[in-house]
Amino acid sequence: MALQASPFPNGCVAGAHAVGWALILPCFWFLDRLIAVCKSTTLERTQRQEQECYLHPLKVFFGSIAFFVLFLLTTPLAFLGFLLWAPLQACRRPFYYHRERPASLEMETHRGFELTGKASFGFASANLCLLPDSLARFNNLGDSQRRAALIGERIVQGVCRPHIRIFIDSPSSCGTLSPSNSMLPTSSSTYGATDRQAPTPVSHHPDPVEQHVDVSDSSSRVVCPPPDDTEHLLNDPSTPLLNSNQNSNQQGHESHRSAPRALLSQGLREQDDVPWEVSSLFPANVDILCLEEVFDKRAAQKLTNVLKPVFGHILYDVGLYACQPPCGCNSFKFFNSGLFVASRFPVLEAEYHCFPNSRGEDALAAKGLLCTKLLIGHNQKQKKVVGFFNCTHLHAPEGEGKIRCDQLNMVTKWIGDFQAVHKRQEEEVAFDVLCGDFNFDNCSPDDTLEQNHSLFTEYRDPCRAGPRKEKPWVIGTLLKQPTLYDESVNTPEGLQRALEREDLRRQYICPPVPAAGLPLVYPENGQPWIGRRIDYLLYRESSVSTRTEIEEVTFITHLAGLTDHIPVGLRLNITMDSGSNE
């Protein structure tokens, strides 16, 4: 049964809520501009160096007076709107659900299991810091509305490009390689520049572009140009790309190959049996996307409008407002959870839980856990195949690991309860994924409690070798905010180059947090410098009906200059157990 789109029980309640928010919005916007006009980003300060020195003080002085007066004038209306808006939160479901109607129901399911018993699924997670503009500026990020539109365009551009695969046939090396970034156009417009709109996907390109290469010398380095029509596909907006909900494996007839066993310059590499890549583009054919810190409602709506031709099922404005249980009246929620989930597959069930133990500035937002159950398709016995996708955003302040550990306990329990209620005996489970911004890393002495949590015995982290020990190829995902606009890292290509060099990572990735009162010794002798990796994509095998292999882990630089986090991607190869198909 499909979820209801509106979070309200009927149109009258939804209309009253809209009126209340319309009365609040002008006052809220003027307050936002009042703060924003006084707070500049480093990019704006750099741009002002070319202006007359007296212009900015005049702008701040007169802008502050104007916005303050307008704020005072609209306060009475905002108060009336608040009296109407706040009580209605008690009957509001904690999310909106947008569904883009496909031409046929078959187009929003995956036929891989039905035809071959195998399938591949791509996941991505990114923290976008889409706060109201004034608050985003404290993270050195401004213009949240413009950033939301650009982020959406870049994501669409990345996931809709042809999935180029290069097959390597040699005695010691076989498998599928991702293309080198040098194979793709590198002009600024390729990365979603402001003067070019990302093409709207209109239909499905069923098969990835393939290039077959014979390698006689296994020690040779392979850099193969794509077919002649690959660049045409990338640059021609009229080229059919993707249906709104179809997966790249929709037809299910392409041969399935193991993970790559050869190295490609600036492309897919493999270490510790995990293929990984630093990519200047979002991975092609991402199936489910989790975004954090999409707090601003207008930014969430812009993201939805841009992403909905590709991801036909979107949950946004997730969370509680005002004084709602379990938060209690002493914890008024000014902001939602910031969680945003976009999926190619229909959402069968969704459930949100708010963390009751947040404090400080984090208590102003309804951070929590969103659990979803997705309809993937059917297996060869025509049994329904589903997937569980969970996302969260944990407590942020440093030095408060006990709060995060308690929240991890809640996450484990809530996921278990959700699956106990919604998992059917007649269904097969393809995947069980947990992702989000955990706000702790696996290298900081200050995060020891979280690093040893039992969650990591249930869910597998592809980047983790053990507590306080990352795999040597891992890259930190939290960028230093003052250097976001440095010329070396303000483009996807530049940030990609910086992440591949350890000396540059030290300049732009946040270092570990030392334990209170103790000096930081990092890295240990013989270990690489990684930095803080606080964005996670985990998967669980004990709760699924399939065999799971990691096809690729990706660190994504496509959003350089638009957020202070590095998005991460994970692609899993799923094989249905033989007993499920017999």
Image: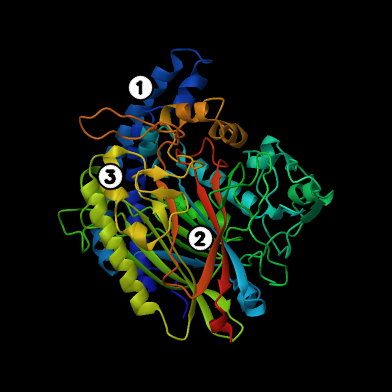
Q: CA distance from mark 2 to mark 1?
A: 42 Å
Q: Quadrant of residue 279?
A: top right
Look at mark 1 in the image and give the residue it sits on.
61
Secondary structure found at label 3: helix
Mark 2 burial class by Cα count in 10 Å: few <14, some 14-19, many 20+: many
Look at mark 3 in the image and give the residue it sits on.
448
The answer to whether residue 539 is left or right of residue 266 is left
Mark 1 burial class by Cα count in 10 Å: few <14, some 14-19, many 20+: few
N-terminal-most mark, 2 or 1: 1
Secondary structure found at label 1: helix
Q: Quadrant of residue 180?
A: top right
| Disc 1 residue type (three-letter) | Phe
| Disc 3 residue type (three-letter) | Thr
| Cβ atoms under marks 2 and 3 closer than 8 Å | no
Position in image of residue 24 (x %, y %): 32, 50
Position in image of residue 400 (x %, y %): 22, 44
Residue 389 vertical placement versus 365 (above, below): below
Q: Residue at x 56, y 26 (%)?
A: 488
| Between marks 2 and 1 in the image, the one whose residue lies nearer the viewer | 2
Position in image of residue 97 (x %, y %): 45, 66
Q: Nearer the viewer, residue 76 or 292?
A: 292
N-terminal-most mark, 3 or 1: 1
Look at mark 2 in the image and give the residue it sits on.
342
Q: CA distance from mark 2 to mark 3?
A: 33 Å
